[in-house]
Amino acid sequence: MLGLKLPTDSRWVNIVEKNIEEILTDHAYCEQKAASTAISLIIGFPEKSELVKEMTALAREEMGHFNMVHNKIVKRGWVLGRERKDEYVLELMKFFPKGGSRETHLIHRLLYAALIEARSCERFRLLSEELDDAELSEFYRSLMVSEANHYTMFLKFARKYGNREEVDQKWEQLLEYEAKLMENLGKRETMHG
Ligand SMILES: [Fe+2]
Ligand SMILES: [Fe+2]
């Protein structure tokens, strides 16, 4: 349903389980970055009213997620650490060539966002199914549903603002590229690592 071509190595959850503080810190910033992405799409494409409306709601929702993760960190007696670099996202965003028209740039950003949501959703599902910590497992189950909705929303916008055939072709290529990236990931206690 998520279209992903390569599932995450199941041993990833075992790595995560040994360092819950680290995954929560990284996760908190993933939510913050998701909110920032929504805001920057508003700034970049203010004339697209439907997008602006949905991105406004999304920014609020993602900051709501950030707040929930932050509360979990504080409740466990920890303090939010510094932002972790997201190598996965940095590598992913090298796929589409730079430049091109403003419209093309929008399609690429929407496709990147759709894929990051899809992979996050898959990771949340793994956490919800495999974590022994009942509270966190329930938490990730509920977030998994939100991220699946975000994934379909971004893909819907890409198809709305671009040429359907071209968008679907780019999406396929991006999925292939992401699967190759994933071959070397799933080894660190970060949300996409
Ligand atoms: Fe989120
Ligand atoms: Fe999201």
Image (cartoon, rainbow, N blue to C red):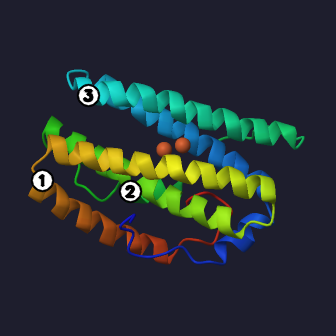
Q: Quadrant of the N terminus?
A: bottom left
- Residue 117, relative to residue 8: is it above or below? above
Question: Gap in Å between the C-alphas at discs 1 and 2?
Answer: 17 Å
Q: Position of residue 193 (x, y in %)?
A: 58, 63
Q: Which residue is mark 3?
A: 50
Label 1 CB less than 8 angstroms from ligand 2: no
Q: Position of residue 173 (x, y in %)?
A: 24, 67
Q: Residue shown at 57%/31% (left/top)?
A: 63
Q: Are marks 1 and 2 in contact (CB under 8 Å)?
A: no
Label disc, if present, on residue 164 of the rendered structure:
1
Within 10 Å of disc 1 (Cα), the crowding (few <14, some 14-19, many 20+) is few
Q: Earlier in the sequence, mark 1 or mark 2?
A: 2
Label 2 CB less than 8 angstroms from ligand 2: no
| Dot 3: element | helix
Side of 135 relative to 33 (left or right): right
Q: Residue shown at 21%/26% (left/top)?
A: 48
Seen from the viewer's position, the closer of residues 88 and 138 is: 138
Task: Confirm whether residue 46 shows in the render.
Answer: yes
Q: Which residue is mark 2?
A: 115
> Which is more foreground, mark 1 or mark 2?
1
Q: Position of residue 77 (x, y in %)?
A: 90, 40
Question: Gap in Å between the C-alphas at discs 2 and 3?
Answer: 21 Å
| Dot 2: element | helix
Residue 118, quarter of the rendered image: bottom left
For badge 1, the amino acid type reads Arg
| Dot 1: element | helix
Q: Residue shown at 17%/64% (left/top)?
A: 169
- Residue 85, relative to residue 101: is it above or below? below
Side of 42 relative to 60 (left or right): left
- Residue 16, relative to residue 47: is it above or below? below
